[in-house]
Image (cartoon, rainbow, N blue to C red):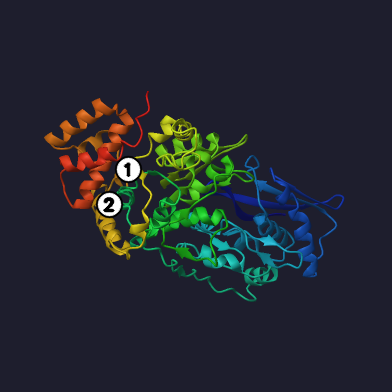
């Protein structure tokens, strides 16, 4: 008799349906799992055997074969324990096979039959809903999977509860979605004393999702400014929250099934590897750039990152997705993030202070910033110098606009962009516009066009730099509530491109 239970295998964010087929056949007693299983899946037979023994269910003296179909799709992870156990129980006639065929299950089994939480419950529930199937997962994952309202989610705490549910002796209630987690208190922009130009750059960056590079001496407030950016951004829309939470589900970062509306903020250390930043490793897990999807990625001490890491950022910044290539698969993750980077002007950090700079100044500054390649530097829409704040300014009371005031302007600018790009898939903010659409929405007036032409000729703007100035000018106009891009908007946009010379070629 052939019995089947459905589960999923993860291919990036996509959860692909997998069928666990079980056959009991005459022969020497054996238990085999086939269908490209990894080590964790192959070891499932021992966990399943022990879990059934704890329930006083003895395996028959037959040859047990579990096939994970499609057989050419790699199967990774311990979440195949539960579907393998359910398929075996159906083959033994303990649970009805017809009910099992209409469900998608995942979960790891402990040796006493308890179900251990696994990653990926949210995308698995999406796949179950698309296949019009019931979702069975460990109780600790139920709140997370139940966010997919189209799926019926049942969350047993043990294999015994799952058996009782399928046999009708003790049906489980539907799982309820977790709470919308309250974001922690954000840091206020008003705490930053001085640095008015940097605050303006932060506002423009948040309004249009423009990448920002800040170069300044140690202690000038670069990290302090970056940490206040999440408090300026509007909350995630329901679609963005679900999209972001699916990535965090695969990484095991959702606590108690809760989903947050706050935009993610990731700040990896400069010793992070390529796999940690862009994704990869065992199971091709999402990296920091994907965990920052729809949020902020802050790279402090940018020149200290390995060159291989920095160069891998160039394509994801442009395309909004990263492809993790492996020998047997290519996994795609979305990564539309706002990149904020900070750097000292040189290794010692005091290039602009003659009394404190090292004896290699100013060549040390050129060598240090030169670690950032021209093509990567060209991808920063805003580049500005962050001067040190004098002690007299630090002694003054907090002043300037609060984060709430600036966030209201950013929200209004983003609302204008949402209306502008309504009906255009993949376009949410001005940073996404390109080609003919960019020329249409960001055409400056006659005076602004003349200023842009002179700047392009004098400062050698690349084609990418030219279009980034147009995007910046469009965002500055949106912050002002202007439908037209005028000369002051273009001039301010150009001023944020002049920190370092444009790269050649």
Q: Quadrant of residue 225?
A: bottom left
Residue 92 screen position, x and y as percent? 75, 61
Residue 324 screen position, x and y as percent? 55, 39
Q: Quadrant of residue 112?
A: bottom right
Nearest the eye: 458 or 103: 458
In space, the residues marked 2 and 1 are separated at their CA atoms by 12 Å
Residue shown at 48% from the left, 42% from the top = 302
Residue furthest right as drawn: 28
Secondary structure under the numbered disc 1 in the rendered image: helix
Secondary structure under the numbered disc 2 in the rendered image: helix
Residue 206 screen position, x and y as percent? 33, 51
45 with respect to 355 (left or right): right
Nearest the eye: 157 or 459: 459
Which is more foreground, mark 2 or mark 1?
A: 1
- Residue picked out by circle 1: 431
Figure quadrant of the N terminus: bottom right
Q: Quadrant of residue 190?
A: bottom left
Question: Does residue 234 show up?
Answer: no
Residue 418 badge = 2
First in residue order: circle 2 vs circle 1? 2
**Above or below, comparing residue 357 to residue 296 in the picture:** above
């Amino acid at each position: 008799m052939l019995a089947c239970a459905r589960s999923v295998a993860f291919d990036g964010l996509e959860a692909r349906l997998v069928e666990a087929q079980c056959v009991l056949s005459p022969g020497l007693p054996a238990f085999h799992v086939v269908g490209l299983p990894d080590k964790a899946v192959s070891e499932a037979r021992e966990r399943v055997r022990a879990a059934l023994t704890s329930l006083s269910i003895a395996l028959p003296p037959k040859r047990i074969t579990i096939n994970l179909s499609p057989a050419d799709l790699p199967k990774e992870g311990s979440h195949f324990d539960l579907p393998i156990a359910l398929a075996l129980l159906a083959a033994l006639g303990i649970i009805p096979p017809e009910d099992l065929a209409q469900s998608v299950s995942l979960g790891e089994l402990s040796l006493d039959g308890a179900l251990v939480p696994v990653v990926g419950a949210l995308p698995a529930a999406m796949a179950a809903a698309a296949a019009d199937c019931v979702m069975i997962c460990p109780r600790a994952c139920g709140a997370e999977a139940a966010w997919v309202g189209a799926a019926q989610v049942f969350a047993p705490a043990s294999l015994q509860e799952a058996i009782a549910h399928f046999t009708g002796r003790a049906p489980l209630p539907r799982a309820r979605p977790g709470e919308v987690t309250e974001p922690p208190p954000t840091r206020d922009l008003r705490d930053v004393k001085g640095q008015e130009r940097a605050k303006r750059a932060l506002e423009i960056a948040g309004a249009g999702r423009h990448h920002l590079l800040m170069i300044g001496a140690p202690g000038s407030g670069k990290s302090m400014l970056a940490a206040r950016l999440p408090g300026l951004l509007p909350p995630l829309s329901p679609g963005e929250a679900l999209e972001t939470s699916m990535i965090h589900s695969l990484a095991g970062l959702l606590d108690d099934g809760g989903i947050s509306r706050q935009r993610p903020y990731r700040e990896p250390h400069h010793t992070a590897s390529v796999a940690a930043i862009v994704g990869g490793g065992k199971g091709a897990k999402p990296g920091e750039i994907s965990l920052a999807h729809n949020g902020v990625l802050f790279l402090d001490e940018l020149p200290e990152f390995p060159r291989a890491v920095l160069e891998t950022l160039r394509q994801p910044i442009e395309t909004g997705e990263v492809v993790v290539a492996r020998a047997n698969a290519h996994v795609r993750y979305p990564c539309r993030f706002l990149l904020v980077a900070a750097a000292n002007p040189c290794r010692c950090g005091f290039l602009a202070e003659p009394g404190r700079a090292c004896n290699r100044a100013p060549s040390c500054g050129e060598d240090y910033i030169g670690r950032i390649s021209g093509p990567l530097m060209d991808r920063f829409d805003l580049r500005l110098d962050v001067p040190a704040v004098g002690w007299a300014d630090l002694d003054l009371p907090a002043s300037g606009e609060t984060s709430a005031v600036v966030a209201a302007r950013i929200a209004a600018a983003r609302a204008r962009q949402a209306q502008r790009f309504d009906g255009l898939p993949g376009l949410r903010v001005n940073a996404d516009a390109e080609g003919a659409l960019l020329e249409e929405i960001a055409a400056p007036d006659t005076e602004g066009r003349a200023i842009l032409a002179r700047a392009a000729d004098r400062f050698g703007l690349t084609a990418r730099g030219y279009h980034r100035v147009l995007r910046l000018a469009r965002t500055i106009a949106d912050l002002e509530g202007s439908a037209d891009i005028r000369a002051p908007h273009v001039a301010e946009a150009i001023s944020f491109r002049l920190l370092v010379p444009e790269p050649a070629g």
